[in-house]
Image: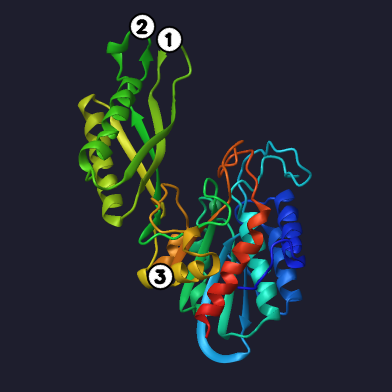
Amino acid sequence: MCLIATNSELHELMREWRKDIHAHPETAYEEHRTAEKVAELLRSFDLQVHTGMAVTGVVATLKGDLPGSYCIGLRADIDALNLQELNSFAHKSRHQGKMHACGHDGHTSMLLGAAKYLSEHRNFAGTVVFIFQPAEEGEAGAKMMLDEGLFKQFNVDAIYGMHNWPGLAQGKFVVHSGPVMASMDLFDITISGQGCHGGMPHLGTDPIMVAGQLISALQSIVSRNVDPLHSAVVSITQMHGGEAYNVIPDSVTLSGTCRAFSEEQRVQIHSQMTQIVTNICAAFGATGELDYRSVAPSTVNHPQNTKICSDVISQLVGDQNLLLEEAPSMGSEDFAFMLLEKPGAYIWIGNGSMEGGKGLHNPHYDFNDQVLALGANYWIALTQDQLV
Ligand code: NI
């Protein structure tokens, strides 16, 4: 298939865009420079561009030259992370404490590359909607775009997403049937006891001791309540309480995250956690308050679109470069919200080795520019396959 050749002029352009975006990372709903750059480029490709959805989201449409009413949405995320970059190359972050450590700079550039190519090769029937989404990192930008009418204004028949995957060799793709990424919920538990002198614990109710019991008890949710053939995680990631050697504090807070692959599992974890918090605290004369918040559901591919993506990839790179049996990830992704409203699929593209800290959300990470043409070619091939 002769689309964008590796190291061609367009590949070089994508590399330039990517490095520029990498050097100027912006986080949730503050991606103003990025959104402006994206919108400007899309306009220069002669696309219809809409800005300002979910504050900094950009949506552009491109109609093919052939008659057709089918419409597909292609989505890239544009935001960076709150993380101090530790790389020293020329395109390293110029914004203190912010970094493109998840490769959304690459995702944005690949989708821009596909938009440029397709605007110059409109031999397809129907419409492509290019969606540049802000605030993917824990801030549910996808949901805000949907709440602001993304699919009412741009009524796509199917929606597709892609993420780079460190540890997966360059040139390879992974397509999952069913769940790809886990749901993400966050929780804060406040344990209230009664503070007292550290040498006279019998005069109070020690919330630190209760926190210890609770931490152990919460680990029974996955080991004793969740079906052993299913996967789930309950992680306590923060613990705060006390400020003196000789004072038992009034309260302690525990915070963390839960992951699962189905709604049933999420409900079960939440309900079990409520019971454990209430009853363990009560058993020791303390009170426990649980604040449990849903951030994103599990990202679940639709069967017909899974098949479409695998067929397109197999034609693009051959069956030997298409992995269909990889385990899903316990990471989460707000593209899940889009898949609840429209049929579609979310795939992984190999970013190469993770050696030297090249994993996602690592301060040494960098998107692999060698795969820019391949990623854009996937978008183009998918469009040409679906809009006929
Ligand atoms: Ni990401």
In the image, taking residue 4 as reference, residue 137 lies left or right, namely: left
Q: Earlier in the sequence, mark 1 or mark 3?
A: 1
Looking at the picture, which amino acid does disc 3 mark?
Answer: Lys
Nearest the eye: 106 or 370: 370
Tell me what residue is drawn at x 76 percent, y 63 percent: 13
Can the viewer see residue 30?
A: no
Residue corresponding to mark 2: 199
Residue 167 on image: x %, y %:
52, 45
In the image, taking residue 326 as reference, residue 128 lies left or right, namely: right
Camera-near label (1 vs 3) is: 3
Q: Secondary structure at mark 1?
A: loop
Tell me what residue is drawn at x 45 percent, y 51 percent: 332
Mark 2 beta carbon near ligand 1 (under 8 Å): no
Quarter location, residue 17: bottom right
Looking at the picture, which amino acid does disc 2 mark?
Answer: Gly
Image quarter where the N terminus lies is bottom right
Q: Secondary structure at mark 2?
A: loop
Camera-near label (2 vs 3) is: 3
Decide: marks 1, 3 in contact (CB < 8 A)? no
In the image, taking residue 273 as reference, residue 158 lies left or right, namely: right
Residue that extends furthest to the top in the rendered view of this protein: 199
Decide: marks 1, 2 in contact (CB < 8 A)? yes
Residue corresponding to mark 1: 246
Residue 231 on image: x %, y %:
31, 46
Q: Earlier in the sequence, mark 2 or mark 3?
A: 2
Residue corresponding to mark 3: 307
Query: What is the CA distance from the residue labelled 1 to the residue labelled 2?
Result: 7 Å
How packed mark 1 is, by other alpha carbons closer than 10 Å (few <14, some 14-19, many 20 or more), is few
Mark seen at residue 8: none
* Up-down relation of residue 141 to residue 25 (above or below): below
Looking at the picture, which amino acid does disc 1 mark?
Answer: Asn
